[in-house]
Image (cartoon, helix red, strand yellow):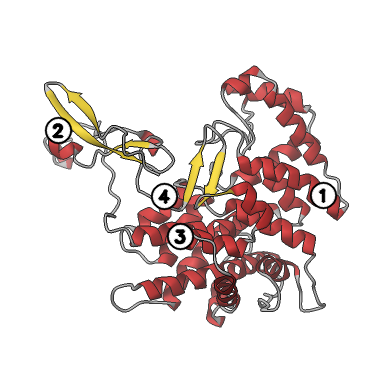
Amino acid sequence: MTNTTAPKTARLTIGDTEIDLPLMHGTEGEVAIDIRNLRAKTGAVTFDPGLGNTGSCESKITFLDGEKGILRYAGYPIEQLAQQSSFVEVMWLLLHQELPSKGQLEQFTHDVTYHTMLHEDLKRLFSSLPKAGHPMAVCAAAVGALSTYYQKVGPSTPEQQWSDAIRLLAKMPTIAAYSYKHSIGQPFMYPRNDIPYAANILHMMFGTPCEKYEPNPVVARALDLLLILHADHEQNCSTSTVRTVGSSGANLFASVSAGISALWGPLHGGANEAVIDMLMAIRDGERTAREFMELAKKKDSGVRLMGFGHRVYKNYDPRALILKQACYDVLGQLGKKDPLLDIALELEQIALNDAYFIDRKLYPNVDFYSGIIYKALGIPTDMFTVFFAIGRMPGWIAQWLEYQRDPAAKITRPRQIYQGSNTREYTPVGAR
């Protein structure tokens, strides 16, 4: 709960001007200086590249403490949800900030299950795109195209927003699977209503009309775990993008399409692909893991350590701890052995015992082990980030809905510090 005895204001001095700025206190003890009236009262603005020290909103969805390595969805520790919950239940939790009753979960599961099919005309979009196109680009295009199938007349209502949320949660796996099937020239597989969410994704990805495909329950549960761990992560780049686009009044499909594009970046969701590429390069190259880590310390070596460090976490990413154990469990249950896991473990041990990495707080993050599990499940490397997007979908939607329902929300419009030329006189082109 908010501490009622905490200080209420912070005093700022700019030259001869002093003003008191209100302090805001989060339920977990966070303190923020409310600068909404700073420019009006002083003419000054703040400067915070990357916005790492700027609170852009109030939210009840996810709590993250990077110093202590804590992640909670609506108060529930990620460790408990990963062990005991399901991805569909986590969807509801993020959307409502409460766990569902048995009846609510059954109805929600039914609604998501029975909205998985895509309009038949949307298939033409996939066939019009190059087969070599990255699946993330295909998914962004398809999600954006949903706006043309579910157009609204008049102001958006809560009922319409909820219907769009259900549609997007249900159809994203179908879009993802279709993007993969298109890339390999196989026929699209319709979703099934008789199997759970994660199993249905595997069916659409790997099934063919030639023979009946039954998803492996071990693989389905591992995928469900990955989706839970990806479901939300506070105000990261893609989530902030979804909120920013939504702040203009853009619909949910357009906003999430922009979020998918943001997630695609190699510094965000695309990092798990880069981790696998790094591990394979060590496996197939002449450098040992230790030699690679030595080169990673040198800025001019051209060698970059992927999957370590995080913009927020300055401790071990709790999701990475869960996935590290999951690597052993999944590979063991599937009867597989992956030399990439051995290399990953060696890299981690070197980093955890080397002053260079310790001083810089470079611990494994969620991308470091997730790619190994995806690979073990048979997911192609260029689909890793697509599955990240499936997992992040409920978080994006929850954040978008929260912004739409916030009476204090405004269109996002950052300021800048202009460093260009002062006033100049225009010279006609013939006189230059």
Q: Give the residue pinned by disc 1.
A: 331
Pointer 2: residues within 10 angstroms few (<14), some, or many (20+)?
few
| SS at mark 1 in the image | helix
Pointer 3: residues within 10 angstroms few (<14), some, or many (20+)?
many
Q: Residue at x 54, y 31 (%)?
A: 314
Q: CA distance from mark 4 to mark 1?
A: 35 Å
Q: CA distance from mark 3 to mark 2?
A: 36 Å
- 229 left or right of 159? right
Q: Give the residue pinned by disc 2.
A: 42
| SS at mark 2 in the image | helix
Q: CA distance from mark 3 to mark 4?
A: 12 Å
Q: Is residue 214 visible?
A: yes
Q: Residue at x 53, y 64 (%)?
A: 92
Q: Residue at x 57, y 22 (%)?
A: 299
From what the image shows, is residue 118 above or below residue 334? below
Q: Give the residue pinned by disc 4.
A: 240
Q: Are discs 2 and 1 less than 8 Å apart at CB? A: no
Observer-side mark, 3 or 1, equals 3
From what the image shows, is residue 59 above or below residue 207? above
Q: CA distance from mark 3 to mark 1?
A: 33 Å
Report the front residue among 87 and 141.
87
Name which of mark 2 and mark 4 comes first in the sequence.
Answer: 2
Q: Position of residue 85 (x, y in %)?
A: 64, 58
Name which of mark 3 and mark 2 comes first in the sequence.
Answer: 2
Q: Residue at x 37, y 57 (%)?
A: 245
| SS at mark 3 in the image | helix
Q: Give the residue pinned by disc 3.
A: 398
Name which of mark 3 and mark 1 comes first in the sequence.
Answer: 1
